[in-house]
């Protein structure tokens, strides 16, 4: 994908969590198309193998791993670095949204949500930062949400985790950007994925969400490609600690 007005990530190694489906899968495909070698991490080995087979050029390596087990994150980082070398780029797309009413949230459900959405992006980054620091270059992209800023029904624990991602992104940038490691976040709006299928399968709700954007439509996974590649490249050399909302202007209204 090298060329005029394109992002060329040839020679870069990227690590993408949640790469078996949805926005994580789209991120892995976009980074691979831009020339990066990609380590795709998720629980479902079969889905990861299908992703690798779809690309078919060896630029994506599958790393099945259950990220919800925090005790295994150091091992995950070691295995990720064994595929193509120490990652330059780390994209945290793995996440969970239980969509529970506030009165129904359990301590167990709260812990799972906060672990996968908030703790994993920090601790996996912490394990991979030394390799980036040694190179003097790195890009970390967290995934925020509309709920980083807005309260949604059935989203208390998810919203708490994504609000935390916004502040964590700023704090990670403060901690590591002087070493050449820029940390930013993408905040997707209503994007058509497996996780948002219940929303898109309800025509009335889907239309209502689209009407709340400035653009007048809901998003497709490919809408994140440009913003993601920008944040993962030299084009964002002076951008860090920011949350880029890719929501069609939903949060602008």
Image (cartoon, grey):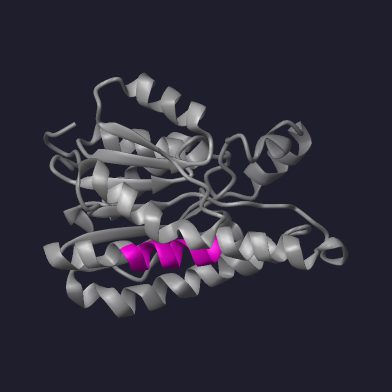
Whole-percent x and y of residue 44?
53, 35
The answer to whether 77 appears left or right of 69 in the picture is: left
**Residue at x-position 46% and y-position 73%:** 168
Describe residue 121's horizontal placement relative to residue 79 as left or right: right
Answer left or right for 85 relative to 165: left
| x and y, in percent, of residue 43 in the image | 53, 40
Q: Is residue 190 left or right of residue 18?
A: right
Residue visible at 64% across and 69% down in the picture? 160
Q: Which residues are magenta?
A: 117-127
Question: Which residue is the extreme one toward the right?
Answer: 103
Verify whether residue 20 appears in magenta.
Answer: no
Q: Looking at the rendering, in which quadrant would you find the N terminus?
A: top left
Q: Is residue 17 or residue 3 the one in the foreground?
A: 17
Q: Is residue 123 magenta?
A: yes
Total marks in image: 0
Q: Residue at x 58, y 49 (%)?
A: 213
Front position in the image: 34 or 127: 127
Q: Compare residues 83 and 156 and report the one nearer the observer.
A: 83
| Residue sitting at x 22%, y 39% | 36
């Amino acid at each position: 994908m090298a060329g005029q007005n394109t992002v060329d990530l040839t020679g870069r190694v990227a690590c993408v969590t949640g790469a078996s489906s949805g926005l994580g899968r789209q991120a892995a495909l976009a980074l691979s198309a831009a020339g990066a070698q990609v380590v795709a991490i998720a629980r479902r080995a079969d889905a990861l193998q299908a992703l690798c087979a779809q690309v078919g050029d060896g630029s994506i390596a599958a790393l099945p791993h259950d990220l919800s087990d925090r005790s295994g994150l150091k091992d995950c980082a070691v295995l990720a670095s064994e595929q193509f070398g120490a990652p330059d780029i780390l994209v945290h797309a793995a996440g969970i949204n239980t969509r529970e009413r506030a009165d129904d949230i359990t301590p167990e459900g709260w812990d799972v949500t906060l672990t996968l959405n908030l703790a994993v992006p920090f601790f996996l980054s912490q394990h991979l930062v030394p390799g980036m620091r040694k190179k003097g270059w790195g890009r970390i992209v967290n995934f925020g949400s509309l709920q980083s800023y807005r309260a949604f029904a059935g989203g208390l624990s998810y919203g708490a985790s994504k609000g935390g991602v916004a502040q964590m992104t700023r704090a990670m940038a403060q901690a590591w950007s002087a070493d050449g490691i820029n940390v930013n976040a993408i905040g997707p709006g209503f994007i058509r994925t497996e996780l948002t299928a219940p929303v898109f399968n309800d025509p009335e709700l889907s239309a209502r969400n689209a009407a709340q954007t400035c653009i007048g439509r809901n998003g497709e996974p490919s809408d994140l490609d440009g913003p993601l590649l920008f944040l993962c490249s030299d084009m964002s050399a002076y951008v860090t600690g920011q949350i880029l909302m890719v929501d069609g202007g939903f949060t602008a209204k």
